[in-house]
Image: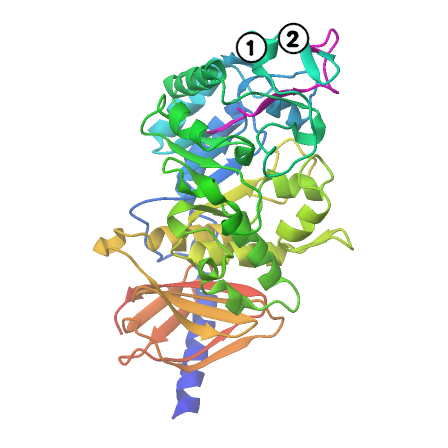
């Protein structure tokens, strides 16, 4: 009896593949015909160092793919002596929106287009420091007298608004020393500096921004954020703290107005998806001090810190790449893109965290921009995530129930009508007589359209999961 059932399911899968080749392609790459549309969207995409006009042009496409927020690079007037991307992270004048990414009018137009497509713009804000004193134009903005600022030409600051130069970091100097010993560090405890920050956030909101990403967040005292965000009520904010364990976040994690990149989870994923790693460590990483609490986490596989580090381009250096670079092999200088995609699948399958997708600079030469917002595997995962949100189909929430736990293959339910399987091994994995509490019926894999049948008692009799793949199933009909 079992052999006959297996044969029937395999024939059905083959028939579905053949049928898919004869039907019109879905309007959304990575989503097969017959997959329902979500009621809501909740995924951030970072369009790293993109011009505002270029972002505006792709906003309708991003909305169709399932994104809800766009993280844009710093828009304030910056050190234009540095044409590379890190010049945007060297503010000069917070009262002016101008520079290589676009004008204030273009910034406002982009925000209006986002509003028209029910999307939010999250602005990268650099409030910890200003220019790199080794990369100043001529004449320089800053003149030093030893380790102190003797004079400067910033419109909003005076020499007393900057810390004395130092480069040795410790827990007691993390908010007072200079990043790289070169980035001119602001005294963020100073009332005037905080007021400049508040005015800047209010200006961005006035131009249509919906939230912020705080650069170098750990290098600013926690009390700063609550005060400056009072100038931008109702906005969303998250920060960058590059630490391997949640226990290292200390006071910052308790700031009610700010979420954080989940660098601890990215570290955990790097270990789990690496050769010889164990995927079972991903079942409940927060309990092992290996992931942030879900309500406070922006979960990511890659961002510009990680990507630029691997490009030797001012991102994470040395050991940081080996800690947080999912799929990255430091010794061979090689990135395994399949590991990256499988890690994204894990993020989209989880209930915890707000997923975040990195998209590289659109000015890179062809073939060098491999982090794309329309990668079919990512789009399938985004659809699964959005279809699993609380409120979708009237369901309050879809908690995780793990059903497959091996070093190389994991699978879990989301509620009783969603199912995900990730197989990092090169060989296929056979699901056989798997008990679940899924509703009986026909399920469809989002990207391929392949069917899966859940029996009246909740069992999955057989399904062969291809090697190096992730499968996202949603219920589409009764038996």
> Which residue is at the front of the view, 219 or 291?
219
The residue sitting at 53% across, 47% down in the picture is 248
> Which residue is at the front of the view, 78 or 166?
166
Q: Is residue 301 left or right of residue 284?
A: right
The residue sitting at 32% across, 70% down in the picture is 442
The residue sitting at 55% across, 59% down in the picture is 342
Viewport quadrant of the C terminus: bottom left
> Which residue is at the front of the view, 479 or 160?
160
Q: Determine which residue is flagged by label 2.
A: 152
Query: Is residue 336 visible from the viewing direction of this image?
Result: yes
**Picture coordinates of residue 274 (x, y %)?**
64, 62
The residue sitting at 70% across, 44% down in the picture is 310
**The furthest residue to the right:** 332
**Picture coordinates of residue 287 (x, y %)?**
44, 61
Is residue 130 within the magenta segment?
yes
424 over 430 or under it: above or below: above
Q: Which disc is residue 157 wearing? A: 1
The quadrant holding residue 111 is top left
**Picture coordinates of residue 397 (x, y %)?**
28, 56
394 over 210 or under it: above or below: below
- Which residues make up the magenta segment? 123-143
Viewport quadrant of the N terminus: bottom left
Mark 2–mark 1 contact, CB under 8 Å?
A: yes
Neighbor class of circle 1 (other Cα within 10 Å; few <14, some 14-19, many 20+) is: some
Element at label 2: strand
């Amino acid at each position: 009896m079992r052999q006959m059932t297996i044969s029937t399911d395999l024939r059905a899968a083959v028939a579905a593949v053949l049928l898919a080749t004869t039907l019109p392609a879905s309007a959304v790459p990575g989503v097969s015909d017959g997959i329902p549309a979500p009621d809501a969207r909740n995924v951030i995409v970072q369009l790293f160092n993109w011009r505002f006009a270029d972002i505006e042009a792709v906003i309708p496409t991003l909305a169709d793919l399932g994104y809800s927020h766009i993280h844009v690079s710093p828009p304030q007037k910056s050190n234009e002596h540095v044409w590379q991307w890190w010049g945007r992270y060297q503010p000069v004048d917070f009262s002016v929106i101008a520079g290589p990414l676009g004008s204030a009018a273009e910034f406002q137009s982009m925000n209006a287009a986002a509003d028209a497509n029910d999307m939010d713009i999250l602005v990268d804000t650099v409030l910890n420091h200003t220019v790199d004193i080794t990369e100043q134009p001529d004449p320089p903005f800053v003149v030093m007298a030893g380790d102190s600022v003797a004079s400067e030409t910033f419109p909003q600051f005076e020499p007393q608004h900057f810390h004395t130069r130092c480069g040795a970091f410790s827990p007691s100097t993390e908010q007072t020393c200079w990043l790289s010993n070169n980035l001119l560090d602001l005294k963020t405890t100073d009332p005037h500096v905080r007021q400049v920050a508040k005015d800047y956030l209010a200006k961005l909101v006035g131009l249509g921004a919906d939230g912020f990403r705080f650069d170098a967040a750990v290098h600013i005292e926690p009390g700063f954020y609550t005060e400056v965000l009072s100038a931008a009520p109702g906005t969303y904010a998250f920060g960058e703290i590059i630490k391997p364990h949640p226990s290292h976040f200390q006071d910052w994690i308790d700031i009610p107005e700010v979420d954080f990149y989940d660098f601890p989870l990215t570290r955990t994923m790097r270990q789990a998806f690496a050769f010889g790693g164990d995927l079972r460590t991903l079942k409940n990483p927060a309990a092992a001090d290996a992931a942030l609490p879900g309500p406070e986490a922006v979960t990511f596989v890659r961002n510009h810190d990680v990507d630029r580090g691997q490009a030797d381009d001012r991102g994470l250096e040395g050991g940081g790449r080996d800690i947080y670079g999912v799929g990255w092999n430091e010794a061979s200088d090689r990135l395994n893109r399949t590991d990256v995609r499988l890690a994204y699948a894990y993020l989209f399958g989880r209930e915890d965290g707000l997923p975040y997708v990195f998209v590289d600079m659109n000015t890179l030469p062809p073939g060098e921009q491999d982090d794309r917002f329309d990668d079919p595997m990512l789009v399938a995962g985004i659809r699964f995530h959005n279809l699993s949100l609380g409120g979708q189909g009237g369901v309050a929430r879809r908690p995780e129930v793990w059903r497959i736990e091996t070093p190389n293959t994991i699978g879990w339910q989301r509620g009783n009508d969603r199912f995900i399987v990730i197989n990092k091994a090169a060989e296929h994995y056979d699901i056989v007589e798997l008990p679940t509490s899924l509703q009986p019926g026909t399920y469809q894999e989002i990207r391929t359209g392949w069917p899966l049948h859940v029996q009246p008692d909740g069992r999955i009799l057989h399904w062969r999961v291809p090697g190096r793949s992730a499968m996202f199933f949603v219920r589409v009909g009764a038996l």
